[in-house]
Image (tube, rainbow, N blue to C red):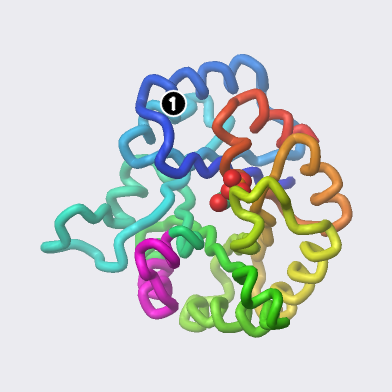
Amino acid sequence: MKLFVANWKMHKTRGPARDFAAELGRSIGDGIAGAELVLAPAFTALDAARDERGRWRLACQNVAAETEGAFTGEVSAAMAADAGCRYAIVGHSERRRLFGEDGPVLAKKIERCREAGMTPIYCIGETAEERDASLTAITLVRQLDALIADAPSRPLVVAYEPVWAIGAGRSATPADCAAARVHIAEILSPRQSLRILYGGSVTPENARELLEISRMDGLLIGGASLSAASFEAIARA
Ligand code: PGA
């Protein structure tokens, strides 16, 4: 079973989310064989993106590092789980870069996900500068440090998203992905239930090759997940 996660980022109010869900529901029928589908809308559109028939699951794009309390504007993991989320994206490069989230904060977010019964989709990936300086491997090790306190028996999804490939119109090569997959699997080797995804400029055109050659367990899709037709085409690839 391959996992396909649609990361809508800060797109879609409830109307467009409902339209997307209706279109996807119509076109996939009973679902896509061999594919687990997950939609990650904004918190406000979770309800609108839900599938009553359970053909796809919901993820949130972020959770608070704290459990509850005086944290104006934050949404806790328990709240997201209560709103129907099975998964939570944690540590997306936009959160790291634009909101200053670092390893210790992300470790707390992962712990909050566990307490709430959600599976984290933990994002890692090197910047262009790190890649040029041959620091990819070291960067991934450092970012995976946030999982040190996380019990290896818990199901985990790690998304390898090189920062230079996100929204760039140019994905990593399948060979890059294959190398990253092996490296990540090695670092996390005692893990019992680990799925490794690739993300960064995935399209219906490159999805098949990326999956086949890299042997990734699925894809995390940004821009190309905003249309139901293209998200479906990727999942069918
Ligand atoms: P992209 O985004 O598919 O638009 O490159 C991927 C992501 O940021 O998760």
Residue 83 place in picture, x, y as percent? 33, 41
At a point 76% along the width and 57% down the height, the residue shown is: 216
Task: Give the amino acid at mark 1.
Answer: Ala
Packing grade of label 1 (10 A; few <14, some 14-19, many >=20) is many
In the shown orientation, is residue 227 left or right of residue 204? left
Reply yes or no: does residue 107 show up in magenta.
yes
Q: Residue furthest left?
A: 70
In the shown orientation, is residue 178 left or right of residue 91? right
At a point 65% along the width and 74% down the height, the residue shown is: 191
Task: Name the magenta segment's main secondary structure.
Answer: helix
Q: Residue furthest top?
A: 26
In front of the other: 23 or 128: 128
Count how many numbered circles sit on residues in the image.
1
Residue 13 place in picture, x, y as percent? 36, 28
At a point 15% along the width and 56% down the height, the residue shown is: 72
**Quarter of the image that includes the C terminus:** top right
In the shown orientation, is residue 205 left or right of residue 147? right
Which residue corresponds to mark 1? 17
Q: Residue 43: in sight, yes or no?
A: yes
Residue 157 place in picture, x, y as percent? 59, 60
Residue 75 place in picture, x, y as percent? 26, 53
In terms of image quadrants, where is residue 46? top left
Q: Which residues are magenta?
A: 95-111
In front of the other: 120 or 174: 174
Q: Would you place residue 112 above or below residue 219 in this image?
A: below
Q: Would you place residue 184 above or below residue 149 in this image?
A: above
In front of the other: 77 or 45: 45
Element on which disc 1 rests: helix
In front of the other: 94 or 116: 94
Q: Residue 190: in sight, yes or no?
A: no
- Look at the numbered disc 1 and say if its residue's Cβ is closer than 8 Å to ligand 1: no
At a point 72% along the width and 82% down the height, the residue shown is: 134
